[in-house]
Structure formats: C-alpha cells, structure tokens
Image: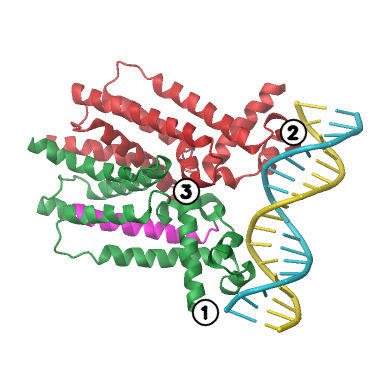
Chain colours: A green, B red, C cyan, D yellow
DNA sequence: GTCTATAGTCTGATAGAC
DNA sequence: GTCTATCAGACTATAGAC
C-alpha cells in the first residue's frame, strides 16, 4: 500500500459516494471509515474537500471518455446507442446511484464554483458524441431519421439522466431502457 | 400576520430552497432569515425538518395537480403537451431551480425514508397524465403515433427532468424545448 | 504517511421567559 | 407565537508527534 494506492482508493470511493449520496451527502469521516484510515490522512492528499471533488470529476470524465471512444467505428449507429445505454446502466450499479455528472449537476448550487465548467464540458462531450451517432444513424438508416440531431442528442441525453434518477427512485433499472425503446419504436411502427 | 401566514411563508420558501439548493442545501437559519424570524419559531410549526419536508412536498404536489388538471379537455394533445412544458419552464424560474420532484429524487438517499412514497406518487401522477395525452395524440393525430404511450410518457418525463437540470447547469431555459421539439420533429420531417 | 488532539463553525433541536 | 439562550453532535480543517 503506497501513496498512489490510498489516493486512488480515495478517488474511487469518493466517486461512488457522490453518485449515491451527492457531494454534500458524505463526509471525510464516511470516506475514511470505508478505507480504514483517519480523516486527517485524507487531508494529506486533498487539503480541501473541493480538491477531492475536482480530482474525482476529472478522473471520472477521462475514464468515461475512454469507454465511449473505445467503441469500434465499424458499429452501426443503433449498436453504438445500445452500448451507450448499457454503459449508463452499468454506471448506476443496481439502481443505487446515478451518473457522476447528473449527481453533481443536481447539487450544482451548493458546489464550489470551479466545477461548473468541468460539468458543462462533461455534458457537452456526451451530447456531441450522441449527436454524431444520430447523424450516422441518418446515413446508415439503422435509426429513425432525426431532423435536428443536435437537439435530439440533448433530448436523449436528458432522458437518460432523468431515467437514471427515476430508476433509483423506483429501484428499477429497466427505466433506463425507455428512452432508446421510444426512439426505436418509431421505426418499429413504420415497419408494422 | 397570523399563524397561517407564517406557516404558508415557511412552506413556500422551503419549496423554493429545495428546488434551488436541495433538501440538505439549506438550513433553518437560511429559512428564518428569509422571512425575518428566528430558527426556534420554525420549530413551533415544524418540530423536525422532516415535518417541513413532508408539508412542502404535499402542498407542491396538490398545487401541481391543480395546474395540470385545470387544462381544458377540449385542447388537442399537442396543445396540452405544450402547456405542460410551459408549466415546467415556469417552475424552474430563470433556470435557477428544478422541479421539486427531481430535486428531491436526486437527493433521495439522504432523505428521510417517509418521502420516497410521496415522490413515487408524484412521478407516477405525471407519467400517467402524460401517457393519457400521448394516447389522445394517437387518436386526434396532433402528435406523431406512439407505439407504447406508457414507455414514451416515462421517457418524455425523464427528458423534461433531465432538461431542467441541464438548463440550470448551462443557465439556459431553452433546453426545456428540446424534448418536445424532438418529439414533434418526426412529424415535421414527415411533412417535409 | 498516518496518527492524536483539537479548533472553530454550522447544524437541528429543546427549555423556558414573555 | 416569538423570543433568548443553550445544547449535543457533525462537519471541515489544522498543528504537531511519530
């Protein structure tokens, strides 16, 4: 157990705590108990809680981008969208948490101001990627035609974020399926 | 200024504070200062913060239902949906807050357990109403055909909730328009 | 690096005067 | 009904021993 290990444990548990309880819903005491150290030791790595927050957000964002961008370019738009939804379903882990992005966006007004930009960047990265997939869908015809892929991407991303929150409220991960099912049902209906 | 007046002020300000900062993001001190009394006086009306929360939720839910159900039955489904979006846009007030339902759902794991059922009821009431409107849309053809109105209603409601959160993040109420624009764009495209 | 000890602040909540 | 005064507990954060 060297320095890196404790630091990484702190970031990983902080991410999970933010996803389940929100930034203001956990304390250094909670975090310390989870990995069996004292609160003062956390301050060695992250003098202020704000420092921990920034590190947690940046690591999460980098890891999320790696997951999304590692999708093979050879997939159809429909396949990419399905994999994206699968990633979002994994992220909530048994319907106990929500994406770090939406968890923090919900707490926005009580957060240190410096994270707002990072959160906006995270949102925009997701929306831009989704817009690209919807544009591909217009070309490869694996998805229903979208007149405004940008607006549709913002709307779909919002639906996924909202679905994560309601999945937790109803303890039912199936709610993550609704947005994509609804998007696809237009095609199903057209084919019927 | 009789009892009712102070009590009503407390509920109104509590609702606004929950919508902007979350249940754990404001204190009795904040609330007392807003209406010019001392914290001890709040305890006269609401001995525990939990009591205030329940009162705020129930009043909000009743008022919301009145607004939604007061829509003339003679409207087309498309008109009802537009009015619903307008209500949701008003509710966030200059993009500083979100609906009380999504604000609390986001804080769910740190809330007293007794509100979970009320929140679920609030969600279901909205989703049921929206499903009815989408079914009407299938009949009056003012909206694109929905193969599964229930799933589409859950998806649309989730999109509105998510859009409220991102509207605050980007300080841009226009994000509330995306879900309905996307829903309607299918028809626009078909007409083009 | 991790600890003990503690400072200083905020929190929800209570007792009792008026 | 509203106040003053106060409590016990939790919180972030710091100083300094080891």
Q: CA distance from mark 3 to mark 2?
A: 30 Å
Q: Which of the chains bears the disc numbered 3? A: A
CB under 8 Å between callouts 3 and 2? no
Q: Of tags 2 and 1, which is closer to the observer?
A: 1
Looking at the rendered structure, which numbered label has been put on residue A3? 1
A45 lies left or right of B90: right
Indicate the secondary structure of the residue bearing disc 2.
Answer: helix
Quadrant that contains the C terminus of chain A: top left
Residue A121 on the magenta segment: yes
Outermost residue to the left: A191
Q: Is residue A114 magenta?
A: yes
Q: Is residue B7 above or below residue A3?
A: above
Question: SS for tag 3?
Answer: helix
Residue A89: x, y in percent? 32, 52
Q: Chain of mark 1?
A: A
Going 36% across and 66% down the picture, which residue do you hit? Answer: A63
Q: Provide the residue span drawn in magenta.
A: A112-134
Q: Which residue is mark 2?
A: B41
Q: Are marks 2 and 1 in contact (CB under 8 Å)?
A: no
x, y (%) of residue A92? 38, 53
* Residue A106: image tag: 3
For the residues beneath circles 2 and 1, the answer to whether they share a chain is no
């Amino acid at each position: 157990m060297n320095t890196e290990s404790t630091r990484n444990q702190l970031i990983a548990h902080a991410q999970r705590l933010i996803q389940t309880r929100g930034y203001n819903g956990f304390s250094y005491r909670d975090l310390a108990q989870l990995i069996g150290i004292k609160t003062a030791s956390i301050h060695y790595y992250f003098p202020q809680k704000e420092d921990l927050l920034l590190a947690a957000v940046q690591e999460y964002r980098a890891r999320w981008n790696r997951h999304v961008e590692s999708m093979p370019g050879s997939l159809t738009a429909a396949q990419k969208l399905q994999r994206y939804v699968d990633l979002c379903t994994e992220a909530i882990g048994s319907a106990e948490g929500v994406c770090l992005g939406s968890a923090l966006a919900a707490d926005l007004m009580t957060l240190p101001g410096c994270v707002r930009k990072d959160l906006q960047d995270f949102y925009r990265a997701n929306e831009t990627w989704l817009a690209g997939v919807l544009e591909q869908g217009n070309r490869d015809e694996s998805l229903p035609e979208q007149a405004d892929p940008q607006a549709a991407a913002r709307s779909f991303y919002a639906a996924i974020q909202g679905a994560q929150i309601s999945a937790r409220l109803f303890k039912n991960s199936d709610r993550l399926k609704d947005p994509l099912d609804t998007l696809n049902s237009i095609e199903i209906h057209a084919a019927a």
